[in-house]
Amino acid sequence: MKKVLLSTTALVFAAGMASAEMSMSGSAEIVYGNFGTGTAPGAADATYSAGTDVDITMSGGNGDISYSATIELDEGGVAQGPVSLTMGGLTIVHDANGLSDLTVEGADGEDDDVADMKISYAMGGLSASIAMDNDTDDSVTVLGYAADGVSATVTMEDQAGAESTEFAISYASGAMTLGANADDADDWDVSVGYDLGNGTSVTFATGADDVSKVTAATSVGAIALSVAQEFGEDDETELSVAYSQGGISFGVSSDSGQAGKYGDEAETVLTFGYDLGGGAALAAKANDQDELEVKVSFSF
């Protein structure tokens, strides 16, 4: 009892200088299906699988500095999670192949995150960041400004020996939003969006590739609807309908530009979700490639 009291007194005394805590969260799932991804199809026959994840997060700091670190455990072993440090407007984050600032195309045709380290600074409306891949020395630097409805960025990327610079600017005033971006390869696009009110908006975009796109979105109660038509060398149509009420959700999405893709990137995808309560949930999805997945997940 004396040791407990002494420890408690020490923690109270130290609270004025610094505080630290540790938390743990976990999840598990049972999956039946054969969902693929991108250009990689799933297995011919559906199978059962299960997975478990546990994250242990440690955080601390005082009024001037904060820091955190995470250890990730799953059925495959133990992995180092993100480690971050924030001091004033400066933030440093390390997460091996876990930062999306730099990406490369994976074997399935979809982008994989490869950035490991990011250093960023923000002061008022000004911001700057640099993200790096330790394996290749690739990097991307972003300078930004945002104030009074205006947002502007300059992105300079050095990846796989190729350097590129992109400029982007947007302006929002009332119900209207204007946007434009261009890069040093003479590629550009502009857009204008208008909020019609009552959850309805319309956006028009066009670019140097002579492709134009009109998107209309609206929501009525528990239903959200989005329709987009792309005009160019290959006309594409996108449609998305989602319903969410209480613990039930349902969705249908179709994109003619995704023909021949698999998994969540397939041309047509149907989804269903149901909250079973107590941290358990049921999810199911299917696509036009005859792929199916049913999953029961648990959070702890």
Image (cartoon, rainbow, N blue to C red):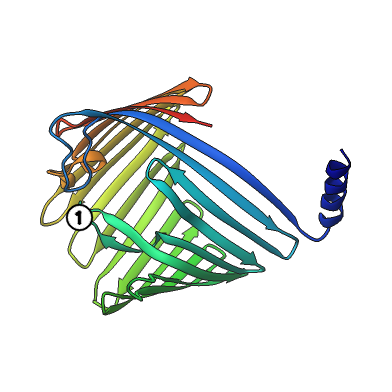
In the image, 245 versus 286, the foreground residue is 286
Name the spot of residue 234 as percent of width and height, x first. 11, 52
In the image, 252 versus 84, the foreground residue is 84
Q: Is residue 195 left or right of residue 124?
A: left
Residue at mark 1: 107
Q: Residue at x 47, y 35 (%)?
A: 27
Q: Quadrant of the C terminus?
A: top right
Q: Report which quarter residue 261 is drawn in.
A: top left
Name the spot of residue 244 as percent of width and height, x first. 42, 27
Amino acid type indicated by mark 1: Ala
Name the spot of residue 225 as percent of width and height, x first. 34, 34
Q: Mark 1 falls on what kind of element?
A: loop
Q: Is residue 93 left or right of residue 46?
A: right
Badge count = 1
Q: Is residue 111 left or right of residue 291?
A: right
Q: Report which quarter residue 284 is drawn in.
A: top left
Q: Residue at x 26, y 79 (%)?
A: 161
Q: Residue at x 82, y 56 (%)?
A: 14
Label 1 crowd bin: few (<14), some (14–19), many (20+), radius 10 Å: few
In the image, 90 versus 26, the foreground residue is 26
> Eyeballing the image, is 22 above or below 30?
below
